[in-house]
Image (cartoon, helix red, strand yellow):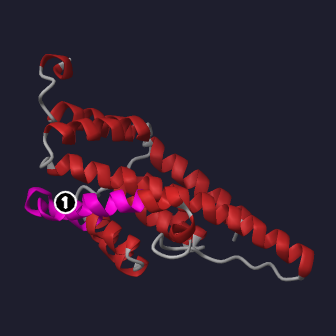
Amino acid sequence: AVNARRPDLAEPFYRDGRMLRALMRDPEALARQDEALRRDPRHAHALYERVILRSRAALARIHDLAAAETRESILEALLHSDKLLARAIVSPSKGFQATDPALRDLVRRLEADLDALEHRATDLPAPNLACARAHRAWISGDPKKALDLLKESISALPPIEEAWRAAAEILLLASRARESVALWDKAIEGDRGYLPHLEGRARARRDARDFV
């Protein structure tokens, strides 16, 4: 393997990480991008990949916390009221970040990578840069701007696959599960065999059934 022959090169670790992300092995993918950036801290594409991976981890953490809160709200409503109340959480900059140390650390690391990536902005294609800036908007508490930027990435030829996922996840966290499912449907039309899209749609369908 190239990694063994030239352990000083960042590129092979970056490419391994991309492959692992496509296989939904995010922790291993993140470790590869860490290795790439240890060798070349200015590797814009490895920084971008780490932004995507850390953002996905933050989204997943918020989704888990929101689901737990929703279950508690439903239980509380069943016990004390005939109304079911659930609070939509659309940004990690409010609410959960203040009370969850793991999420707070994820966002801190994500913000540092986004800052570094802005210094390498000219090394990224425009659709990828829009996708990265969408994550900045999202963690800053502006999901509308984030979705607008993600639409730019989705409209690119070829579309940026990670933009589909980010947009669908943001919609899901905003209690817009049916819109999330519809977006996954469009993504799958373009790549019917891509496992992350199929898995994402399955989760959105579950939430549309259980929480909407």
Where is mark 1, residue-wise?
117
Dot 1: element: helix
Q: Is residue 129 above or below residue 201?
A: below
**In percent of the image, x 84 and y 77: which residue is there?**
77
Residue 185 seen in render:
no
User: Toward which corner of the image does residue 107 lie, by quadrant?
Assistant: bottom left
Q: Is residue 132 left or right of residue 166?
A: left
- What's under tag 1, amino acid-wise? Leu
The quadrant in which the N terminus is found is top left
Q: Nearer the viewer, residue 48 or 19?
A: 48
Report the quarter where the C terminus lies.
Answer: bottom right
* Residue 154 in picture, x, y percent from top left: 32, 64
Q: For residue 12, what is the image quadrant?
A: top left
Image location of residue 185, percent across then percent down: 49, 59
Residue 168 versus residue 158: which sits nearer the camera? 168
Which secondary structure is most common in the magenta stretch? helix
Which region is colored magenta? 106-131
Residue 6 x, y percent position in the rendering: 12, 22
| Front residue of this view, candidates 162 and 54 | 54
Can see residue 118?
Answer: yes
Above or below 95: residue 118: above
* Lateral position of residue 129 relative to residue 212, left or right: left
